[in-house]
Image (cartoon, rainbow, N blue to C red):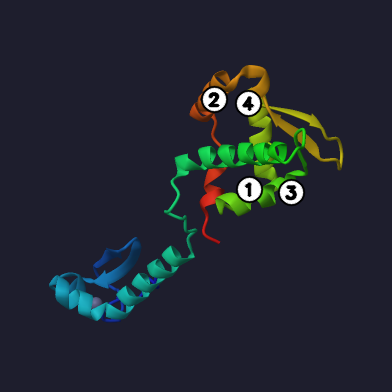
Amino acid sequence: MSGTTACAACGAALTGRKTLWEYKGESFWLCATCAALPMERRYALLKSEIRRVDQEAKDRAAAQVQYRSDIREEQLEPLLVHAFLDLIWERKAAGKLELVATMETIAAWLSDRTRLPVKAQHVQYLTLALRDGLVISVGGGGIGRPNSYDTRETEMGIDAFWDQVDAFLLVWKMPNRMSLLQVI
Ligand SMILES: [Zn+2]
């Protein structure tokens, strides 16, 4: 707010009655004469202030975080879960017993596949949740060592396994999931 000593429109000293005029959340003091003017005349006198307020609102909007619109929020979990299960199956198709990799490596692979900015922290959330949801088993690991991951498909049977995946996706949400949709 500009000073309260002069009228924001005509600049006259505010000695007598004054009126508070608001534009997009900013307040300006007007003298009684300017406050009584028809709206168009008042706007004309306040043009530079109005331009400044408009510009500031525009700058604030531009500085705000943008989110991509090509992927919906609720698509994130299915995308990540299926991409992660695919990783395990590809390893097994290549003759390995399970997927063995650090969370950083898995994060890079998942980023490649989903085009989402997946970080090691997301992988940790995802794999712990999948383990607790009885979709995968996690072994190995320890400080500085990669974990090993396998699906529970073989021990459960295909139908029961997919039911478990569906049930998991109904309830699980990635913590801080909107960070994955930020436009960087
Ligand atoms: Zn005035």
Q: Nearer the viewer, mark 3 or mark 4?
A: 4
- At label 1, counting other C-alpha atoms closer than 10 Å, the crowd grade (few under 14, some 14-19, many 20 or more) is many
Q: Could you tell me the amino acid type at mark 1?
A: Leu
Q: Locate residue 94: give its quadrant.
A: top right
Contact, CB < 8 Å: mark 1 with mark 2? no
Instruction: Determine the secondary structure under disc 4.
Output: loop
**Marks 3/1: CA–CA distance:** 10 Å
**Marks 1/4: CA–CA distance:** 18 Å
Q: Could you tell me the amino acid type at mark 2?
A: Trp
Q: In the rendered view, would you say 91 is above or below 16?
A: above
Q: x%, y% of residue 137?
A: 72, 26
Mark found first going from the N terminus, 1 or 4: 1
Ligand 1 - quadrant of the structure image: bottom left
Q: Residue at x 65, y 43 (%)?
A: 122
Q: Could you tell me the amino acid type at mark 4?
A: Val
Judging by the rendered image, the residue that carries numbered circle 2 is 162
Judging by the rendered image, the residue that carries numbered circle 1 is 110
- At label 3, counting other C-alpha atoms closer than 10 Å, the crowd grade (few under 14, some 14-19, many 20 or more) is some
Q: Nearer the viewer, mark 2 or mark 4?
A: 2
**Marks 3/4: CA–CA distance:** 21 Å
Front residue of this view, candidates 171 and 1: 171
Q: x%, y% of residue 24?
A: 32, 63
Q: Is residue 159 left or right of residue 133?
A: left
**Marks 2/4: CA–CA distance:** 9 Å
Judging by the rendered image, the residue that carries numbered circle 4 is 135
Locate the N terminus by quadrant.
Answer: bottom left
* Mark number, residue 104: 3
Q: Which residue is drawn at 64% across and 29% down?
A: 130
**Marks 2/3: CA–CA distance:** 27 Å
Q: Nearer the viewer, mark 3 or mark 1?
A: 1
Contact, CB < 8 Å: mark 2 with mark 4? no
